[in-house]
Image: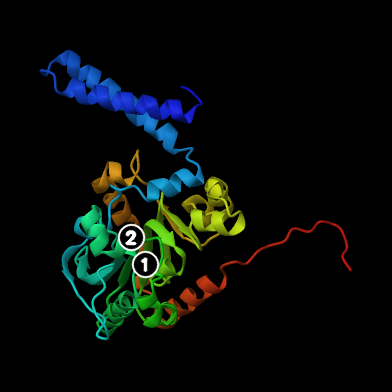
Amino acid sequence: MTDNPENERVEVDQLERQIEELAKLVPSDNTANELDRMRRRLEKLRKEIYAKLTPWQRVQLARHSQRPVVPEFIDLIFEDFVELHGDRRFEDDPAMMGGMARFHGEPCMVIGTHKGKDTKQKLQRNFGMPKPEGYRKALRLMKLAEKFSRPVFTFIDTSGAYPGIGAEERGQAEAIACNLREMARLQVPIIVTITGEGGSGGALGIGVGDRVLMLEHAYYSVISPEGCAAILWKDQSKVEEAATALKLTAQDLKGFRIIDDIVPEPNGGAHADPKAAAAQLDEHLKQALAPLKSLPIRKLLDNRYKRFRDLGSVVEAATGSNTA
């Protein structure tokens, strides 16, 4: 095994091509055995590579063009999903989707940012960047869930809220701030999952919850590495350094208690096996929801408040030196 990541990726590509070519041959015991050996080798190699990804590589993986988007997770995890539209003030925002569904037979509300996958979808969905009407639609659906005592599941995959002139004119900041306030006191369980990109206030606008989960190769940050590099160094070549400094990986954030749980992804990332990724997420969602359902509303809200008030607390070790 080489210590050079580039050589490892080349070996993965070669193995994938060899497996594809071998699979086309006439089946026999020899080819079956060889295919099995090569697939095991490929799985082992992927596991070793993905175990030592840098923060910047994880950001790139979170942005992978084939990474599962919110509708795929909804299809694979929930039943009887019925999408609801509009904020009842301006228009429907396709970058934010949501609706009623069932989670293991229990009625719930599902809300998430939707990036789209191909060029046509990305343009239609505004690359997953919601406008004020998107956040107001999300809040309308949360209030509907509260009315009927249904838990809320939110899924975050956005580089941030849309920064356009129209969005600012219609109150982008106010819409996000209103969501933060109302989610903090919503009288039903809220479970948040960052599935890909979790960018700035655009992510936090549907990110206040009782439990916050994060896929293994997702990221969650106040700013993108590119934005950070531009502000601090005025140099885009510093993106890798910025990604490391931002502490934006699931592993970092779990250590800071900003998220509650990391959802493992299949070897090669969620895009390599969306069904396996959804199965893992389904199990973690089930475990997160179970203890919340039995909590009295007052206790649920107190715990939610305390969870966010405790964020950012630090413990300073004594140095033994006296300060004036």
Q: Residue at the spot x=47%, y=40% of the render? A: 53
Say what secondary structure mark 2 lies in. helix
The residue indicated by pointer 1 is 191
Q: Which residue is more in the foreground, 163 or 260?
A: 163
| Residue 205 vertical placement versus 266 (above, below) | below
Question: Which image quadrant is residue 173 in?
Answer: bottom left
Q: Position of residue 195 (x, y in %)?
A: 36, 56
Question: Which image quadrant is residue 193 in?
Answer: bottom left
Q: Residue at the spot x=51%, y=71% of the render? A: 307
Q: Position of residue 143 (x, y in %)?
A: 30, 82
| Residue 218 vertical placement versus 305 (above, below) | above
The amino acid type found where label 1 is placed reads: Ile
Q: Residue at the spot x=43%, y=32% of the render? A: 48
Say what secondary structure mark 1 lies in. strand
Task: Quarter of the image for the C terminus: give it.
Answer: bottom right
The residue indicated by pointer 2 is 285
Question: Which image quadrant is residue 323 in?
Answer: bottom right
> Alpha-carbon neighbours of circle 1 within 10 Å: few (<14), some, or many (≥20)?
many
Outermost residue toward the left in this view? 26
